[in-house]
Amino acid sequence: MIAAEEWPPPFYLAPGPGGHGPPGRGARGRGWRGRARRRFGLCARPRGRSIARVTVLEAIQRSAEFLAKKGVDAPRLQAELLLAHLLQLPRMRLYLSFERVLAAGEVEALRGFITRRGRREPLQHIIGSVSFCGRELAVNRQALIPRPETELLAERGWMFLRQCAPVPPRPVTALDFGTGSGGVAIVLACQCPAAEITAVDISSAALALARENAARHGVAARLRLLPGDGFAALPPDAVFDLIISNPPYVPSGDIDRLQPEVRDYDPRAALDGGADGLDFGRRLAAEAARWLRPAGRLMVEFGDGQAERLRAIYAAQNWVVEEIVADYTQRPRILIARRAGV
Ligand SMILES: C[S@@+](CC[C@H](N)C(=O)[O-])C[C@H]1O[C@@H](n2cnc3c(N)ncnc32)[C@H](O)[C@@H]1O
């Protein structure tokens, strides 16, 4: 047995059948231990202390206890996901491997992961990717981690594009305003192979990530990525069937109260929606019509408690709000509008 307080800070156990790699090379930072330490940012094992045997189940339990103490949500799930990622197994396979003894390199690597998660670094940053609409996207601190509710936005977007039937025929077009890591734009391009997608973002670093993700999913040729401040990034003749956006919508004063995973790791420019969180809602309501085809749609994600104020903002700017779509938790989340009088 190992003591809970030993996980993940110094966690050195007696040698066991898991095998601990070639002896005698870790102390000077060479060999597999040195590589593991460099990769995961671990400190060296003190002299005279040996690494001991820990099973998959013990590792999960100790990790979950540690993460719970650090205030991490769903600590057991987080521990399992990190261990499954480390062992390159589907999470459910861990349940068939509870008695498996971890190799020392695995223990050290897991310690690194759990230490980072305990500091409230998002799981997705530790793993380096997130699944969005069933597609793996690289993520890092340069862009917001795409959220499950935004999958619904993307889905409504591709459903609309698929039923567009321009006469005479031409490629349908969409603009993703504030694309971040590119998720929405990439999914639209994947789901609508005849569509031409443009995506803008004020952050060049986020666009670099979006470019990498577009290449990973084979849609780079149909995805135009433009840096700049909203519609100012577009060429003057641009026009779209769909303008879709998950803009920053957190009221500035609320950002400091967000979970550390969001507050400290998502870029502020991806969160900050101004004093009432509606700056981008107002901007899209005022500026989007100029870039939208007459039969086009505007689809915008928004935050809790913003639905009715946004509805009024759009109505005042001559939009017909067709639908307010609720997310998976039944909270109003997406506004769908068309231009009035067309
Ligand atoms: C909430 S994040 C959404 C990112 C991505 N669409 C998603 O759903 O994961 C908002 C994005 O808008 C970008 N942004 C903020 N201000 C902008 C502006 N003035 N013009 C263009 N993009 C902007 C941010 O850099 C950020 O990537």
Image (cartoon, helix red, strand yellow):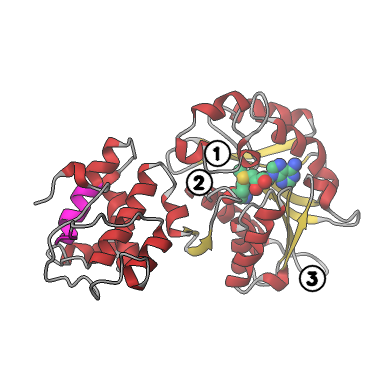
Q: Name the element at disc 3.
A: loop
Residue 117: x and y, percent? 37, 47
Looking at the image, which residue is at 23% across and 73% down? 23
Tell me the quarter of the picture where residue 337 sits.
Answer: top right
Q: Earlier in the sequence, mark 2 or mark 3?
A: 2
**What segment is highlighted magenta in the picture?**
50-63
Number of numbered markers: 3
Question: Which one is nearer the viewer's eye here, 198 or 161?
Answer: 198
Outermost residue on the left side: it is 1
Q: Which mark is residue 149?
A: 2
Tell me the quarter of the picture where residue 67 sits.
Answer: top left
Kindly identify the amino acid type of the residue bearing the numbered disc 2. Answer: Glu
Spatial CA span between label 2 and label 3: 32 Å
Disc 2 residue crowd, few under 14, some 14–19, many 20+, Cα 10 Å: some
| Residue 301 visible here | no
Q: Earlier in the sequence, mark 1 or mark 3?
A: 3
Residue assigned mark 1:
333
Say left or right for 188 vs 297: left
